[in-house]
Image (cartoon, rainbow, N blue to C red):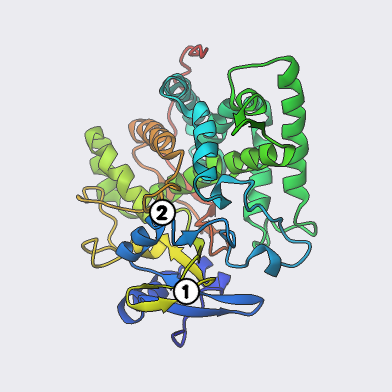
Amino acid sequence: MTLDGIDLLDLDRFQRGEHHEMFRRLRGEAPVSWHDHPLGQGFWNVVTHPDLVAVNREIETYSSEAGGISLLSPDEMPGDVGMDTRGVMMLTMDPPKHTRYRLLVNKGFTPRMIGLLEQYLRHRSTLIVDNIIQRGTCDFVVDLASELPLQAIAEIMGVPQEDRRLLFEWSNKMIGIDDPEYASDDSTEASTQLYLYVNELAKQRRSDPRDDIVTKLINAEVAGDSLSELEFDMFMLLLTVAGNETTRNTTAWGMWALMQHPEQYAALCANPDMLNPAIEEILRWASPVYHFRRTALADTEIHGQPVAKGDKVVMWHISANRDEQVFDDPYTFDITRDPNEHVAFGGGGPHFCLGANLARMELRLIFSEILSRIPDMKIAGEPQILRSNFIGGVKHLPVTYTPGVKVNPEPVAVG
């Protein structure tokens, strides 16, 4: 069923924040509801926390590869929009292929690599705050929230830091295809530019190998075969977008929430030991990826609702993270929330976010730096939200604060 007044394809309603009320109604009145799509087959909505976790983990029943992860399957999309990534991008693979490819990418996220990266990013966090602290005003998203994830993913990929803003611009255009600020006449322009760039990077690494993910990927084998150019491109696209968009937006939503709750902001500044539970609440609150989609591989049922083989099933993380049956007072931002079984990184299963530990580390580092040096940040203008029902994005967040002094620590060697 589709409830009157609920339209999960209306991107303007998401941009205005009206989706929370739509999902509240769905959780209470129709936990598994049908939604038509004007351009293709409709889809089932999974909006409660337990149902989302179940679908995520039942990999024999719900496929990422059969129809892709978007609301429209590749064969339903207009000819000039996107491409069919099924079987060549980890997000659109099923085990056992997904398992083999994930093990490959894990080589770039070893404990040693993350440990070295943490040293580097701690130093970079200080410099990022140094860059704005004397000004007393900035765009929190562009000047602060975006920088640490960008610098981290550039380091992992082997992209020169002076090119990191290219990753920022390309990922904005790829994710913001339905937002007037980022929309382009050529919807594939940004991804094409990214592919050209990373293939040139791969060419360089063949003659000058380094300890980065590009070198590992071009020399890797999966089931005895090297990666094709398309598979390599898809890996790099996933790292570029997932590696900076989600953490950037979580940081922005988190700071926005703290500024709206100055008593919790002050408590965190006074007691840094509260930061870890605060980060978990920020992740729940932000839910930076609103949904992922699966395809039913057999006749089944969810929450008593029959679902036919071939049906689309859309898991709404943004709704599950406000589920009244799991979270007490879910519409209240509470940095002391415990327990906090949010699904910001997915509901478990093989597609649980590969970069979860990296994201938590980045959030801890940048918030530690902000809270210790800027205790009085305030919203200074209207925040601007991404027009999307897929990514929960904050495009701009103007802020003011009392100007401070630079620290300028000595560089930390990473090798």
Q: Which residue lies at the image location 34% right of the left edge and 65% below the top edge?
A: 51
> Residue at point 67% right, 40% down?
231
Q: Is residue 266 left or right of residue 290?
A: left
* CA gap, disc 1 and disc 2: 23 Å
Q: Is residue 18 visible?
A: no
Instruction: Give, as a three-letter code, the residue at label 2.
Output: Ala
| Image quadrant in which the N terminus is located | bottom left
> Which amino acid type is marked by label 1?
Trp
Left/right placement of residue 414 relative to residue 174 reads left
> Which residue is drawn at the image coordinates 25% and 49% (left, top)?
263
Q: Which mark is residue 286?
A: 2
On the image, the x and y values in percent for residue 177 come to 67, 59
Residue annotated with mark 1: 44
- Measuring from the top left, give residue 404's x and y in whole percent: 43, 29
Secondary structure type for disc 2: helix
Q: Position of residue 176 (x, y in %)?
A: 63, 56
344 w.r.t. 321: above or below: above
Q: Quarter of the image holding residue 41? A: bottom right
Q: Quadrant of residue 238?
A: top right
Camera-side residue of 410 and 373: 410
Q: Earlier in the sequence, mark 1 or mark 2?
A: 1
